[in-house]
Amino acid sequence: MANSKSAIKRIQINERNRLRNKAYKSAVRTLMKKYFQAVEDYTATPTPETMEQVQKAMSDAYSKIDKAVKRRVLHRNNGARKKARLARALKKVAVPS
């Protein structure tokens, strides 16, 4: 157990930050899964409505990733890699028009 008052405070701060980081990472993973599901639905039935859902899911995921990077929950290269993965998934199934 911590001996000094400052060490006790640091433990509390670390726990608070750990929980906040965990929430961001969980949200990013959830939004990425929703995006991949939307892309899968678009692949099955390529309609303008499903493409709109894909775009909204991508926007939500990009936004959360950018916020996590801004708050240093994710490293910027990690954020860029996640966004590139999302873009690549859509590019693979997008119908050239």
Image (tube, rainbow, N blue to C red):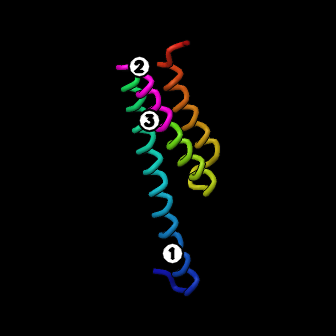
Q: Distance between the residues labelled 2 and 1?
A: 51 Å
* Front-lying residue, 71 or 42: 42
Marks 3 & 2, CB-CB < 8 Å contact: no
Asked if the stretch drawn in magenta spans residue 49, the answer is yes
Provide residue 11's location: percent of width, then percent of height: 51, 75
* Front-lying residue, 1 or 52: 52
If the image is split into quadrants, where does the N terminus sit? bottom left
Provide residue 59's location: percent of width, then percent of height: 53, 40
Q: Mark 2 points at which residue?
A: 46
Looking at the image, is mark 2 or mark 1 earlier in the sequence?
A: 1
Residue that appears at 49% across and 26% down: 89
The answer to whether residue 91 is above or below residue 35 is: above
The answer to whether residue 88 is above or below residue 35 is: above
Q: Is mark 3 on a helix, strand or loop?
A: helix
Task: State the predominant SS element of the stretch in magenta.
Answer: helix
Q: Name the residue under label 3.
A: 35
Q: Is mark 1 on a helix, strand or loop?
A: helix
- The crowd level at tag 3 (other Cα within 10 Å; few <14, some 14-19, many 20+) is many
Marks 3 & 1, CB-CB < 8 Å contact: no
Provide residue 91's location: percent of width, then percent of height: 53, 21
Residue 87 disc label? none
Residue 11 disc label? 1
Looking at the rendered structure, the kind of residue marked 2 is: Pro
The answer to whether residue 39 is above or below residue 32 is: above
Q: Please report the bounds of the magenta region as a residue range.
A: 45-57
Q: What element carries label 2?
A: loop
Mark 3, mark 2: which one is toward the viewer?
Answer: 2
Marks 2 & 1, CB-CB < 8 Å contact: no
Mark 2, mark 1: which one is toward the viewer?
Answer: 2
Mark 3, mark 1: which one is toward the viewer?
Answer: 3
